[in-house]
Image: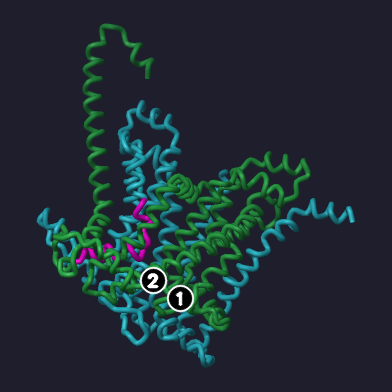
Amino acid sequence: MASLADVWRRREGLRALVWLSPWLAGVAIFFVYPLLSTVYFSFHRYDMYTLEFAGLDNYRYLFQDPRVLTSAKNTLWLVIVLVPATVLFSLALAQLVVRLKAGAGLFRTIFYLPSLVPMAAGTITFVFLMNPATGPWNQFLALFGIQGPDWFGDPAWSKPSLTLLSLWSCGQLVVIFLAALLDVPKHLYEAAAIDGAGPWRQFRSVTLPTLAPVLMFALVTNVIYALQYFTQAMIASRVASGSTDSPGSSFSPGYPDESLLTLPQWLFQVGFRDYSMGYACVLALLLFATSMIFTLILLRQFRRAEEAS
Amino acid sequence: MSATVTAPPRTVAAPARRDGVRARRRRLLVWIATHALAIALALMFVAPVVFIALTALMTDQQALTSDLWPRSWNWANFAVVFQKSMLLRWAANTLMYAVLGTVFTVVSSVPVAYALARFRFTGRRLAFLLVITTMMLPPQVIAVPIYLVWARLGLTDSLWPLILPLLLGDAFSIFLLRQFLVTIPRDYTDAARVDGCSDLKTLVRVILPMARPAVAAVALFQFFYCWNDYYGPLLYAGVEQDHLTLSLGLATFKAFHSVQWNLTMAATLLVTAPVIIVFFFAQRVFIEGVTLTGVKG
């Protein structure tokens, strides 16, 4: 019996397995099983009542579905404009707060707080503020002689409107960058200043190299979040178009003019409003494939960071 | 600094002082510029909340105009929101989701993070990569099969499909806790081991007291995630008004009261207020927690 206890003490792997087992069960139930099941359903037609084999029909339809291309274009816009704008703006804000001698804590709080506002509330707020008939935003722009557009009601301006919302709620990133900036050794700046490096040169040669891993991490995770973009777009479309989600009411996702349609929203509509579960699974696999590309980049970064430490 | 002040001989003191004056003036200008910029930006960040508060206090008619300042202060609008919607019911549903979700997450995620951070075993790195992969997985990818399972169990039209899975660990929480736990020096746990502590005793007596800020951060983040969640309840809560959460209810509120922006804004404020209040009580936990998510390997 004593030897069994000995084995237990020495076999860390066995003990780890016991500690990890609930989570491993969770991974099996909520990751592995649904993923395999998604593949299975993708070859079938399923409306929650009848299941029939459909071969590659769902996949073929993917290439005829104009909404897929539309959501891909919209997502690409988010990845190319919204994500970099948010990350760079957060970095600029963090740089600013670091330089503040008075009230840095207060400013940090003000910049951070909007990120805690429930996304539903924040989105509704922005749809109202930027509504040309009632909101103050266009009146503010008029002070500078700018004639503001119909932001959330205009397909050309709905994505820039969401970008403004994203800038407003970027506080998490600001705090992350702030911590990273405070981690940069002070003496490096002093050494650079003695060598005659100006502010820009100091940023490029001292700040950027130390910040690079954090910056890359922020970029990649935010690209993955952009691929999942759902809540803000869905609520903006709903509120701006004034439609409900009650059964029987018609709601065209992506209002105005599908300019806010993203793949997750289309998947939701196809799977859970039209009950074409099979085709929804094809869309899910497409989403999985694209997000995995960026997850792999993220994993490589982690491995590098792990080896460095 | 003091060395540069005392080092120059007297003869060069005068130009040095003039340089000092110029440098000081430049520093003052930079000080003014950065603070002015910060104040301007801070005003932009605060402005949305101010404007929705002002609109929330207007009459129905005035809220439809482009006026910015309420002609009369209609504090009763907040009471009207409670009468016209099931706000309290939504808050109760949301609270149940958030409280149970947070408790389940902490209880189930701490042991996993502990094992990932402390035990040496083959596949340990693989397990960590699996945590990150599931953390970054878009929830929509696995939505269809999971939904079908909950439907078969008869648990759709409730929030249980969102709460129960948290009993088996939450990837983001595990990740965050693990990032913190690996920074605790091994000496502490080794000492406990020498004293004959079991793994469980080491976790409870040694690790947990040291990891309190990380556990607090994880609990707060999970609470806020559940409180603000829109996608999950949209999928599972159904459409009955008394099943909704705050986010879900707020999003439908506008549709049912489309010409009453004032009420919608009042509801928006009421939904947001608890979040802000909690933040001011737990500000430090938040800031330290967010810093943990920044990742230093």
Splitting the image into 4 quarters, where does residue A273 fall?
A: bottom left
In the image, residue A100 above or below residue B167: above
Residue A278: x percent and y percent? 49, 84
- Mark sitting on residue B182: none
Q: Position of residue B222 (x, y in %)?
A: 50, 59
Secondary structure mainly formed by the magenta segment: helix
- Residue under disc 2 on the same chain as residue under disc 1: yes
The answer to whether the residue labelled 2 contacts the one labelled 1, judged by CB atoms less than 8 Å apart, is yes
Query: In which image quadrant can residue A80 be found?
Result: bottom left
Q: Is residue A48 left or right of residue A234?
A: right
Which residues make up the magenta segment? A113-131
- The hue used for chain A is cyan
Check disc 1 and give the amino acid type. Ala
Q: Residues within 10 Å of mark 2 (few under 14, many from 20)?
A: many
Q: Residue furthest left?
A: A145
Kindly identify the amino acid type of the residue bearing the numbered disc 2.
Leu
Mark 2, residue position = B248
